[in-house]
Amino acid sequence: MSISDLPCFTAFKIRAISPYDFFLTVRKPAGWSLLTPFEIFEHGTLWTGVRLNSGQMFGLKLKSEGTVKKPEISCTIFSRKRVSVKKRKELSEMVAWMISAEEDVREFYALAKHDPLVKALVEDLYGMRRTKQPDIFPRLILAVTLQMAPIRRSDQMMTLLIKEYGEKITFDGREVLYWPSPERIAKADVRELEQRCKLGYRAKTLKGIAQTICKVFPTLQELEKMSAEEAKDRLMKLKGIGEYSADIVSPHPGFALDVWSAKIFSLLLLGEEAESPRIIIPRLKKIAEDRWGKWRGYVFTYVLNDLNNLSRRFNLNLTEL
DNA sequence: GCGTCCAGGTCTACC
DNA sequence: GGTAGACCTGGACGC
């Protein structure tokens, strides 16, 4: 693991479009982290890290100084060297994009008028946003380690990858571990990756992906500018990335159903337990697209972060599938 | 303890 | 173009 000390800092404020719940957005109820599983959240303040496409590492300290109705987030960025005024502006725009501060979800919330599921979701998680990560490699690691493995094993693989090949950043008296760079994994020995991170056959896949994106591959921001289909096609050209993984990585709103989430949506949308979850995935995706359109990605995120409440509300067992 | 099974997909060979 | 089978590994389960 490499270690970076980030002594310089610059601060600014971000105003978000209301309603915006900072806590629910950066610390999701299902335990999803904003940028790395090793970020720190204490007394309403988040310390985390981010690697830009240039490879530069930054420390981030985020804190809400507003309310859900009048949201304002204070952001301090820590770096190795002092940042210029131009770079500061770029960083401020990047953080706002990352935490979806400028995304207006009122159209999504309007669906609640006629859709009982959305109504429940909005009541439970009012103001929560989907978030984005500027660097694509952590998303690809997530997608690959989720394949063919129970969630605990996926967590084990990701944790080992970060601890063995990631980067430790120190700033503001804190230490945060961040994902490995694609350059580091591209150079790693496959056998060593397999053994140190318990990746099995995924070691070869991950190294291949790292090598490809080190050469030439669109950034997440570039994929976002493409059509959803084009972005997905580009992602699926990576060996080891199929439709499910492409949906997880793509910045476009998708409906990344796997066997586990297909069981949940089968109960919610069809009112029945799925006998063959993998078989009904295309059908569930079609229903989601017809019912929620471009907001289906939001429904997906809200549902997976609201399983306890939904189980109670609709008298279903969604938490032990 | 030990053996067996299989998981929050993807790719390939074969028909 | 459709589909069965292989793929690492470790945790769950039955004995």
Image (cartoon, coloured by chain):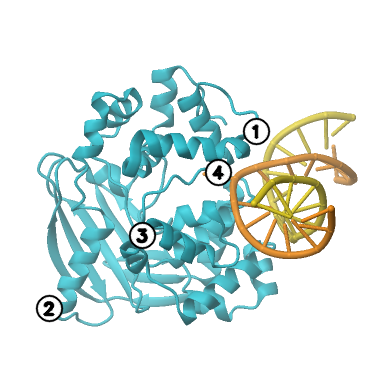
Chain colours: A cyan, B orange, C yellow
Q: Nearer the viewer, residue A221 or A38?
A: A221
- Per the model, the C-alpha gap separating discs 2 and 3 is 33 Å
Image location (x, y in percent) of residue A42? 29, 50
Disc 3: host chain: A
- Per the model, the C-alpha gap separating discs 3 and 4 is 23 Å
Q: Which residue is mark 3?
A: A227
Q: Is residue A316 left or right of residue A302?
A: right
Q: State the residue lying farthest toward the left.
A: A70
Image location (x, y in percent) of residue A114? 27, 24
The reply to whether label 1 and label 2 mark residues of one chain is yes
Amino acid under disc 3: Ser
The reply to whether label 2 and label 3 mark residues of one chain is yes
Circle nearer the N terminus (1, 2): 2
Q: Nearer the viewer, mark 1 or mark 2?
A: 1
Q: Is residue A291 left or right of residue A145?
A: left
The reply to whether label 3 and label 4 mark residues of one chain is yes
Circle nearer the N terminus (4, 2): 2
- Residue at (24% x, 47% y) in the render: A44
Provide the secondary structure element on which disc 2 rests.
Answer: helix
What is the number of callouts on the image? Answer: 4
- Residue at (38% x, 42% y) in the render: A301
Q: Which residue is mark 2?
A: A85
- The tag on residue A276 is 1
Q: Which residue is mark 4?
A: A258
The reply to whether label 4 and label 2 mark residues of one chain is yes
Q: Nearer the viewer, mark 3 or mark 4?
A: 3
Image location (x, y in percent) of residue A218? 40, 72
- Per the model, the C-alpha gap separating discs 1 and 4 is 12 Å
